[in-house]
Image: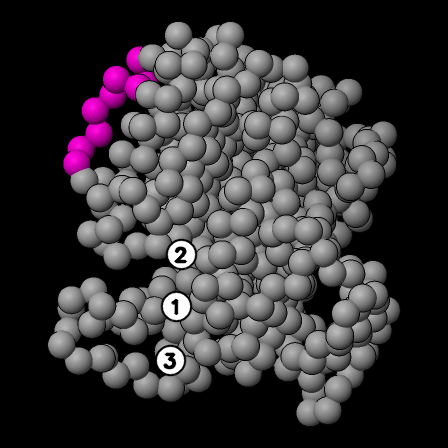
Amino acid sequence: MVVLGAGSAGEYVSGELADAGRTVALIEKLRVGGECPFVSCVPSKAMLRSAQARGDAGRLVDLGGSAVPAGLGGDEDAYRIAAARRDRLAHDRHDDGHAEAAEERGVTLIRGAGRVTRPGVVAVGGREIGYQNLIVATGSEPVVPPVTGLDTVTTWTSDRALSEPGRPASAAILGGGPIGCEFAQIYRGFGVAVTVIESMPRLLSAEPPAISDAMAGVLRGGGVHLRLDATVKAVEAAAGGATRIVFTAGPPLEAERLILAVGRRPVTGGLGLDRLGIEPDAKGALEVDSRCRVKGHLRVWAAGDVTGLAPYTHGADYQALVISRNLLGQDYTADYRAMPRVVYTDPPMASTGQTETQARAAGIDVVTARMDLSDLVRANTDGGPGGTLILVADRKRGVLIGAAGLGAGADDWISEASLAIRAEVPITIWADVVHPFPTHAQVFERPLRDLAAQVS
């Protein structure tokens, strides 16, 4: 087996196959472990936690933890401390531990850029390696939008922003998706003047409007400025190294730093896949079947962001599991019906399955139920901000097909909905489940009973 790319999916599948006694070469030109441990998931969640801790400390009197306000020190000094903690958790972006762990499992690690030269052969660093099965797990990279003047100003991608030791005084974040929302809270939590620019009329446009509105309320409540339905016409250098952003409508905006968070694209260029007759789709992704085999190719597989199907670390690991089981003799197919989507803001947004709009477009007889999380006892005892939950069910089958929520603990309790979707648990049965009091998981009880009344 040859695995191109040692990100989350590549690291996972190569280890599983090596554990089973297969001969595996893992080829990586940057870091074993990929983006997530070093410049993505781990550092961003570390910074979010630091910002949240600072926010909680600022509310210490309101939460009954002190009779006097806590001394927090300056924002800039605090950011440096948070960044130092971030870098420790990211192992200062050194992949030694990941590399050693892979080799201890029997994986042959080869540093360099691999390229298919002909069917059954990959070249890397002047060396040719034969394979029976090729697994493409090259991940994704930040998208740089085609904005006039972008090459004349200093910009940060998300990777760069999560590697810098200091914070700007002001930041304009281009993109109101998950990355943009998380970055907004990180920087605003340390006193940065933040503006999120989104070309769509709402944040998190793939989620239900009520969830988008709730996220907008959270960010605005924290002091983040939002410019929605805003198209950037051009950018240009401003005094002091700042950036001036010009819009097709509305006044211009100046910020010390422009952060690009408009998404990521699969990395498929330069791999020599054309030698195998493989052409990525219009978005650069590799089309795979239900077993994660590249369509039309018996011995070529793909997992992770490069497939464009489930662009999350947990999605990459899941696809790597599917490939591993198939290569080890099982007949295993992927099921994406309940793949969770999470934005790790405070409170977090989490969703799984279909939205109401998607379900209706698919011809499903839909029933829905909602819950205001401010009614939860646990939200009040914790001093949380409340939130909302939307459940979507198939009336005919009497099962859940989608859920989306924004509220404390949503990143954890959404898994209960994912399980219900995958297992097709009858709503009437799930509605009878007792949750401990007081917990955030009780968020399901009232809307489930509402749904049970509609489907039974």
Of 371 and 119, which appears nearest the observer? Answer: 371
Of 132 and 180, which appears nearest the observer? Answer: 180
Disc 1 and disc 2 in contact, CB within 8 angstroms: yes
Which mark is first along the chain, 2 or 1? 1
Q: Is residue 373 left or right of residue 288?
A: left
Amino acid of disc 3? Ala
Q: Tell me where residue 104 appears, x and y as whole percent.
A: 41, 45
Range of the magenta residues? 429-437
Amino acid of disc 2? Asp
Q: Name the residue under label 2.
A: 346
Q: Tell me where residue 255 appears, x and y as whole percent.
A: 65, 79
Task: Look at the image and tell me in which quarter the C terminus lies.
Answer: top left
Q: In this view, does 183 lie to the left or right of 124?
A: left
Q: Name the residue under label 1.
A: 51
User: Residue at position x 80%, y 48% from top?
Assistant: 270
Amino acid of disc 1? Ala
Q: Which of marks 2 and 3 is in front?
A: 2
Check the image and report above or below for 56 versus 394: below
